[in-house]
């Protein structure tokens, strides 16, 4: 079963509301998702964001170049090596 990036964030948000700390959230994600779980540091960052007022579990808009561009049914990676 595939898990989208929003689903672990939703779990983290709910766990924070229940008083869980980052290590507890991470351990539960590892138990459920195994190697597909978010890294601990990422979980810790999200655990910090929700009490600071973050409401959305979706990615925020960012300025700059997109990660890829589609031209005539070909996809080209922009930037990075």
Image: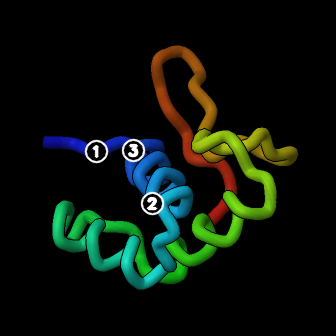
Q: Residues within 10 Å of mark 3 (few under 14, many from 20)?
A: few
**Element class at badge 2:** helix
Q: Earlier in the sequence, mark 1 or mark 2?
A: 1
Res. 79 image quadrant: bottom right
Relative horizontal placement of residue 45, taking residue 21 as reference (left or right): right
Relative horizontal placement of residue 22, taking residue 2 as reference (left or right): right
* Above or below, 2 relative to 42: above
Work out whether residue 10 or residue 35 is closer to the camera in this orientation and state it: 10
Residue at figure coordinates x 73%, y 43% from the top left:
60
Which quarter of the rendering shows the N terminus?
top left
Residue at figure coordinates x 47%, y 51% from the top left:
14
Which quarter of the rendering shows the C terminus?
bottom right
Mark 1 vs mark 3, CA separation in Å: 7 Å
- How far across and how far down the image is residue 49, in percent? 71, 63
**Element class at badge 1:** loop
* Above or below, 31 relative to 18: below
Work out whether residue 60 or residue 16 is closer to the camera in this orientation and state it: 16
Label of residue 3 in the image:
1
Relative horizontal placement of residue 34, taking residue 58 as reference (left or right): left
Mark 2, residue position: 15
Mark 3, residue position: 7
């Amino acid at each position: 079963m595939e898990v989208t990036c929003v689903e672990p964030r939703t779990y983290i948000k709910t766990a924070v509301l229940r008083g869980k700390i980052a290590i507890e959230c991470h351990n539960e994600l590892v138990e459920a998702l195994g190697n597909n779980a978010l890294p601990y540091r990422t979980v810790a960052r999200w655990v910090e964001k929700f009490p600071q007022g973050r409401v959305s579990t979706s990615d925020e808009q960012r300025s700059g170049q997109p990660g890829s561009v589609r031209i005539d049914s070909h996809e080209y990676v922009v930037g990075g090596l």
